[in-house]
Image (spheres, coloured by chain):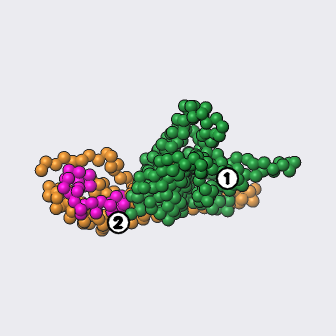
Chain colours: A orange, B green
Amino acid sequence: MWFLIGIILIFLIIVIIIMYNTLVSLKRKYEQSASGIEVYCQQRFDLIPNLVETVKEYAKYEKQTLENITNLRAKYNDTKDLTIGEELNNKMNNLIALVENYPELKASEQFLNLQKSLVKTENQLQAARRIYNIDVTNYNTKISVVPYNIIAKIFKFKPTKLFEIEDKSNMKNVDVEL
Amino acid sequence: MYIAQIYGISSTIYNKAGFEKYDRYSSQDLIKGTLESNTPFNLAEILTQKKVQDDEGHIYYQNIFSGLFIDAKLPKNINSTIYFKKDKGNNSFLNKIPLFNSPLNKMKIELDSPEFEEVFDVFSDNRMLTMQILSVDIMQMIVEFKQEMKFDFEITIKENDLFIRFKCGQMFENGNIMEEALNKERLYRYYKTLEFSLKLSSMLIRSINDVIL
């Protein structure tokens, strides 16, 4: 009898270890993806001073928007918080969409040069975001299904938020009267 | 675009796409053209066969692949390889054990489109690059084509080559070309396949151009 209980206990311990390790590796995977987002966010946000300078020259009425973006970038640099990164990237995209209202700015050599880098970093960030969201979804799903939810509760694995970027097609160009 | 009917695509080019091994290769009905950014584009019918020996020792050839094959030179080298292969449902428990996992399976990329993953398994040595090239629009277009045309197809992007092959069988068999040329359904399938190939190639080229500056 005790032998049987012993075998069941050993079996249970092995199962718990395997499930725990699965959760840890899924967590590590999304954390790694998060660091990918950080890298691409940084590359993208490094373009902000240049973007701000270029826009400032042609779109003097956007002073408040530019200030907001500059402040948010400083905040992101201090904290490296992905939620702030998310907000900053969305504001940056809105600013780029705003350029449509300024034909001279859009056609300027300075902006055209910058645009290539903006497109590249945007693509990289989109891809990094998709990778991160896949990994987070896998992790969140795992910790919510039986029997992993029990292990997750015991070892305090918590669900994580996805990284959202506003769809460019949903962005409205802001009409500005000059 | 023009038709160079005498020739097909050489087996050396076909082999670069990394499809299965064969014993006999033939190609015909080559169509040549250029896509945007002056990308050269070749399309031809391909037939590959393997040698099979029956119990009595007779040797015969069995078809492995019969259909259209496309080769386009990309303007930029991605320095990597991406395979889109038919989803074989290799998600069994055994495949999750490293010992039983093939080298190709280890390269499998997880995507964010369940519809696309139902049709294709994607393998690559560069996850980030694959996600950058394989935009949501491209995945959707591939799924829609597959749903409409039903036949299988595979895509390989290797360095600066793009290869697509459609397992659609021979579109026009020798001998009764007049009869087949008047078959509306067959012509529609051929036209849709050509249209899809050109559109997909152009979208991939644009995507690669955005990714690699």
What residue sits 70% from the left and 50% below the top?
B49
- Left-right relation of B176 to A39: right
Magenta span contains residue A107: yes
Q: Position of residue B31 (x, y in %)?
A: 53, 48
What residue sits 43% from the left and 57% below the top?
B208
Q: Which mark is residue B212?
A: none
Q: Position of residue A132 (x, y in %)?
A: 44, 57
Residue A135 visible in this rendered orientation of the protein: no
Q: Amino acid at mark 2?
A: Gln
- Label 1 vs label 2, nearer the camera: 1
What residue sits 64% from the left and 45% below the top?
B66
Q: Which mark is residue A43?
A: 2
**Magenta segment, prevailing SS (helix, strand or loop):** helix
SS assignment at label 1: strand
Taking B150 as reference, is A117 above or below it? Answer: below
Specify start and end residues of the magenta stretch as a single range. Answer: A95-122
- Left-right relation of A159 to B172: left
Q: Position of residue B1 (x, y in %)?
A: 47, 47
Q: Which mark is residue B25?
A: 1
Indicate the quadrant where residue B102 lies.
bottom right
SS assignment at label 2: helix
